[in-house]
Image (tube, grey):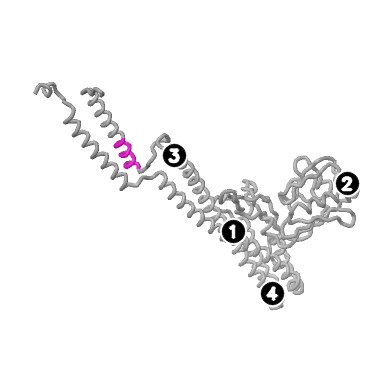
Amino acid sequence: MNRITNSMINNTMTFNLQRHQTEMDTIQNQLSTGKKVQTPRDNPIAATNQMMYRTRLSEIDQYISNINETQSRLNEVDTALQSTLRIFQRIRELSVQGANGIYSNFERKEAAATEINQLLEEIVSIANTRGATGKAIFGGFKTGTEDQPNPFVPIYMTLTAGRQGDAMIGVEYRGNTGAQIREVGKGDTMEVNIPGNKVFWATDQMLTSGQDATNYNAASNQVIKIDGTEIQVTAGDNIDIIIDKINNAGLSVSAAKGGVNNLILSTTTPHQIWVEDKGSGTVLQDLGIINRNYPQPPNNIDSTVTIGGMSIFEMIIQVRDDLVRGDQELVGGRDLGLIDMALDNVLRHLASTGAKQNRVEELAKKAEYEKGNVTEILAKNEGIDYPETIMNFKWLESIHQYALSVGAKTIKTTLMDFLR
């Protein structure tokens, strides 16, 4: 038999009361914060899961932000392309009318030329459109400089034909081929821009070198870049091996050898070919494609290269000049064909942009659904059940009151209680 002293009863009662207060304090904190776990030691597994869920929520929020920006950028591109399409339709209408001979001499030489010049100015303005961030949407990575703020630079000359005055005779692209990419999902990226050398091009381009490469062999291991894709050239490679490497690089550019063993580069989709020798390499310079004095793009094609194909701007200028000359046959034949090719290219990029917009809308819905799902899981993992927690608190409160009542009757608080 154990001897129970008054001190032991007192200590046991005090311990139980403190334990009740601790448990009540824990539940009170849960009720005030709405969370089950206050510190990791309360429930290490639940705390770890909560960190994972919160990390995932942060990721989803960033993806939603990227998706919203992507939507805005694609809307800007779509608006610009829609405007370009409307201008092309008007130019085609003017060309059809000019080919049918319904214009008088004045209308053909002055009125039509004046309108086309204005439409040409508007297309250049569209090509230099800047988005909400102030960057040119068709300039690649180029943000512009004080001396040259726009990616498309018009060239003017005074034209007496049709009394045009200072009219545009050409447009140079000073941007680059940089693709602006946004991550719209885990491991899922999307380009939000179209470089100007692709969208504002009317026909396939062909670059025909005037350099005989019969005895050419690469002097060292070098790298060439075509449309932004790097191609490794090994020491000793001749023109045939280089052509095979270009054709196997998965580009929209094909390479061939001409009649004098010269290099010919041709696009398979309308765009301006972007070529450069990387670093200290000179392969394309040695093959006569790149100008040695100006090796860096843009506009680095050697003067001896025969260039085939034209940009949208060159095509419009040609239509204008043919109308001014009154050459109905060229306007109704060659020019209308070129206009249709340019329209097809704009429509192709417009369709691609529309497909991206549809995809981004679905990604936005998916991200919002996933965010709601993860938020619900997190709430269940860290949140308390208020009715149950309140019931537990009331139960502890009742137990504590009973303990106090029992203790008051069991523990004698004064010496007089023992003398009765």
Queried whether the magenta region covers residue 363, the answer comes back as no
Residue receiving disc 1: 356
Between marks 2 and 3, how big is the CA–CA gap?
Answer: 67 Å
Extent of the magenta region: 23-33
Residue receiving disc 4: 96
| Upstream in sequence: badge 1 or badge 2 | 2
Task: Give the x, y percent position of residue 255.
Answer: 81, 55
Graded by Cα atoms within 10 Å as few (under 14), some (14 to 19) or many (20 or more), the crowding at tag 1 reads: some
Q: Quadrant of residue 204?
A: bottom right
Which numbered dot is residue 216? 2
| Residue 294 appears in the rendering | no
Q: Are marks 4 and 1 in contact (CB under 8 Å)?
A: no
- Please state which amino acid type lies under the numbered disc 1: Lys
Q: Nearer the viewer, residue 78 or 200?
A: 78
Q: Are marks 1 and 2 in contact (CB under 8 Å)?
A: no
| Upstream in sequence: badge 2 or badge 3 | 3
Between marks 4 and 1, how big is the CA–CA gap?
Answer: 34 Å
Please state which of the two labelled residues, at mark 4 or mark 1, is closer to the viewer. 1
Between marks 3 and 1, how big is the CA–CA gap?
Answer: 39 Å
Residue furthest to the front in view is: 1
